[in-house]
Amino acid sequence: MMEWLSPEEQQAVLLSLRVAFWATIVSLPFGVFTAYALARWRFPGKQIVNGLVHLPLILPPVVTGYLLLITFGRRAPIGAALHEIGITFAFRWTGAALAAAIVAFPLMVRAMRLSIEAVDPKLEQAAGTLGASRIWVFLTVTLPLILPGVLTGAILAFAKAMGEFGATITFVSNIPGQTQTLPSAIYAFLQVPGGESSALRLVGISVAIAMLALVASELLARRLARRISG
Amino acid sequence: MSLSVRLTHSFEDRRFDISFEAPSGVTVLFGGSGSGKTTIVNAVAGLLRPEEGRIAVEDRVLFDSDTGTNLKPHKRRLGYIFQEGRLFPHLSVKQNLLYGRWFAPNSALPARLDDVVDMLGIGPLLTRRPNALSGGEKQRVAIGRALLASPELILADEPLAALDEARKAEILPYFERLRDEARVPILYVSHSAAEVARLATSVVVLQNGKVARQGSASEVLSDPSVTPMGVRSVGAVLEAHVTRHHDDGLSELNAGGVPLFLPRVSKDIGDMVRVRVAAQDVMLSRDRPVGLSALNIVPGTVASIRSGIGPGAIVSLDTAAGRILSRVTRRSVADLGLVPRVSCHAIIKTVSVSPQDVGG
């Protein structure tokens, strides 16, 4: 299917898809939970949590990458402890996924939080009076109503994860087949003479995936919104 | 089953100190805004925690500040009918109706979907989404949803207030059926004397955060000292049965032997109805008037006269049809020489009784 790409280019595209997929899937439940907490709960330190969630959006990606390196690197305390139980991030594709997830997290949470704030709490109250406990209220009323926002958040996060570069290259370097994602590959091709045509092909793929994600999220959100409003 | 409520609560600068019993049937909480109606309903539903008190359905305690009992709303076995319906927009009408059933305990006697759908006339709506329903249809579905949760107590917080007059007239009969068929207490919040007159088995009048009066609808509404909604809502409730439907659009009723002519009543011959007669629609005459267009002339004797600071007075008349109230000027009271025990006639224009004032 991708014969027009060199093996090296194919590798980068497939790796990026894998990294973005897992980054999105694993952060999804955390995203919903964080968005719900920020939208609905009042707790001490809420502004701090809100700030932390949004930090990767504002920080230079290289700073995020470096912070990840000194937290999850093999010689860092948390990284070493995780390595003991078989989870390694440093210089692995899993590290690229972690970096992508963290950088994409604010986008995901913002989209979900907006849709949670749009749900009338009176509907949740009504569900409670009909016998539904809080978890059931969430599963049967809140979640179906925020589904468009959840999907939009997931797709935006996926697109952002596909494009993550600065934090990834700082944290897990640029190892072909292991941590060389699409943007890292474009960067690498641009560093060698005669690499422009490869870089250009990957740029095209990048643009296509980003556009596809945006259009898909737009269509999905519209369709779901129509279904919900009858 | 009956509901007992005792609570004290402070809310902003208001203080509520309330205690009453609600038997099976409809207990209307009647009062103006800020009188504590919604506070009571939310406390019973568990959406508000009162500072002190005890709320119980029979011997099942929902809230008791002494023992620290405070059941979560979803454990209270309620059917709450909200003013705005609050149907779930992502579910069909049928899924909305069955929502409460997912959570009802197995011990509950399930209300049957078919019966409820029949009673409310919502069969054709089952596959629709709430957004495709009219205001009146939404409220009927909301009633059904509350019923199908197999509640031990039904709460209705001004369920008609958001509807126009025509929709109110459409929904009221369903509440009458609910009252007659549900075997659980129904706590119904209202500020409409017409709704009280038609629905109430018992009325709890709230004023300034306290229970000002409790009694049957006819007792409470025909007491001129009870005017939580202002003097314009004062009026008596007569109980009568339908004797005949005339060809000219009138129905003839019999109230304690007194014939009453009303605009066509949508009830069968022999049915009992309650008729609310607003005090301001009743004229008084010492002699039996002749050559008058009004069809209903009811003889009686003056029981009491109550006048306030304004120019008006409320005259209570004992008649064979029941107690009738009339709002006249103090000048007329003096000119007619009205004092207790003099005989007098109450004149009620047929067209002044609207269909909303007549119910089962």
Image: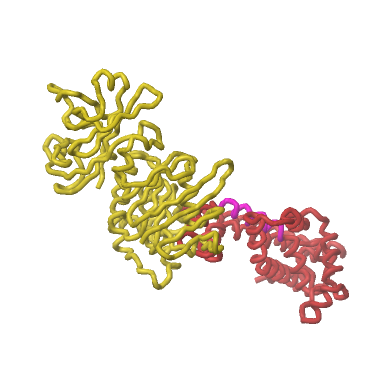
B78 up-or-down from B156: above or below? below
Residue at horizontal 52 percent and vertical 60 percent from the top: B64
Q: Position of residue B240 (x, y in %)?
A: 19, 43
Nearer to me, B76 or B207: B207
Q: How is the image coloured?
A: by chain
Q: Colour of chain B?
A: yellow
Nearer to me, B13 or A64: B13
Q: Quadrant of the N terminus of chain B?
A: bottom left
Residue B212 appears in view = yes
Q: Is residue A227 left or right of B298 when viewed as pictured?
A: right
Q: Is residue A112 magenta?
A: yes
Residue at horizontal 53 percent and vertical 62 percent from the top: B70
- Chain that is red in the image: A
Residue at horizontal 58 percent and vertical 43 percent from the top: B12
Q: Is residue B137 magenta?
A: no
Residue B348 appears in view = no
Nearer to me, B77 or B337: B337
Magenta residues, start to end? A105-119
Q: Is residue B99 left or right of A40 when viewed as pictured?
A: left
Residue at horizontal 30 percent and vertical 19 percent from the top: B331
Q: Is residue A53 left or right of B274 when viewed as pictured?
A: right
Q: Position of residue B50 (x, y in %)?
A: 54, 53
Q: Position of residue A25 (x, y in %)?
A: 65, 68
Instruction: State which quadrant residue B21 falls in.
Output: bottom left
